[in-house]
Amino acid sequence: MRNHRSLARGFTLLELLVVILIIAMLAGYVGPRLFGKVGEARSKTAAGQMKSLSDALDQYRLDNGGYPTTEQGLGALTAKPADANKWNGPYLTKEVPKDPWDRPYVYKRPGENGREFDLLTLGADGKAGGSGEDADIAY
């Protein structure tokens, strides 16, 4: 007759180590791919937000005859500037969003290279230039 203890046997240390090794290998393979998608999603979010801001800026220009000055900034889309007599806003339903890295978007008027305005985010590092997730995104 067998003892009941021998039937309720646990895992050996070797079996546990093999399972942990398999989990670590899967995490090493899936982790970088998953985190790469997070950076890509932030870049796409920034591009979408800047499209919405650009559309609101265009509506502001139609009403007021020009884009807000650099000093007025994107805040002119939600609060009437003192010198905007034909302001018909707010041009955004919510406050001006921050970029996906929790920094304000950069708005300059006039823009560089003959553009009416520049609207951009400096990416994850918050510095001009860079590549990958650190790259600047301009609209």
Image (cartoon, rainbow, N blue to C red):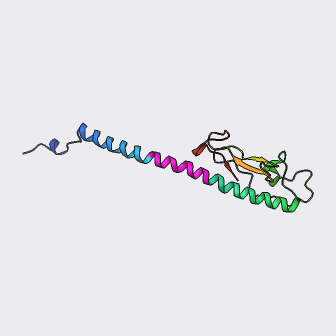
Q: Is residue 32 magenta?
A: yes
Residue at 79% over, 49% down: 111
Examine the residues drawn in magenta and state their main secondary structure. helix
Tell me if 4 is positioned left or right of 119 in this view: left
Q: Nearer the viewer, residue 97 or 41?
A: 41
Residue 91 visible somewhere in the drawing: no
Q: Residue furthest top?
A: 13
State left or right for residue 1 relative to residue 127. Answer: left
Q: Is residue 38 highlighted in magenta?
A: yes
Residue 69 position in % (x across, y down): 85, 49
Residue sitting at x 42%, y 48%: 30
10 above or below 89?
A: above
Q: Is residue 80 left or right of residue 2?
A: right
- Residue 105 percent across, percent down from the top left: 72, 47
Residue at 62% in and 54% down: 45
Quadrant in the rendering for residue 59 = bottom right
On the rendered image, what quadrant is the N terminus found in?
top left
Residue furthest left in the image: 1
* Highlighted range, magenta: 31-44
Note whether 139 is above or below 12 in the view shown. Answer: below
Q: Is residue 137 visible?
A: yes
Q: Nearer the viewer, residue 19 or 2?
A: 19
Write down the quadrant of residue 89 in the picture.
bottom right
Residue 29: x, y in percent?
A: 40, 46
Tally of numbered discs: 0
| Rendering coords of residue 135 (x, y %) | 62, 45
State the residue lying farthest toward the front: 113
Query: Residue, x 93% and y 57% (percent of image)?
Result: 85
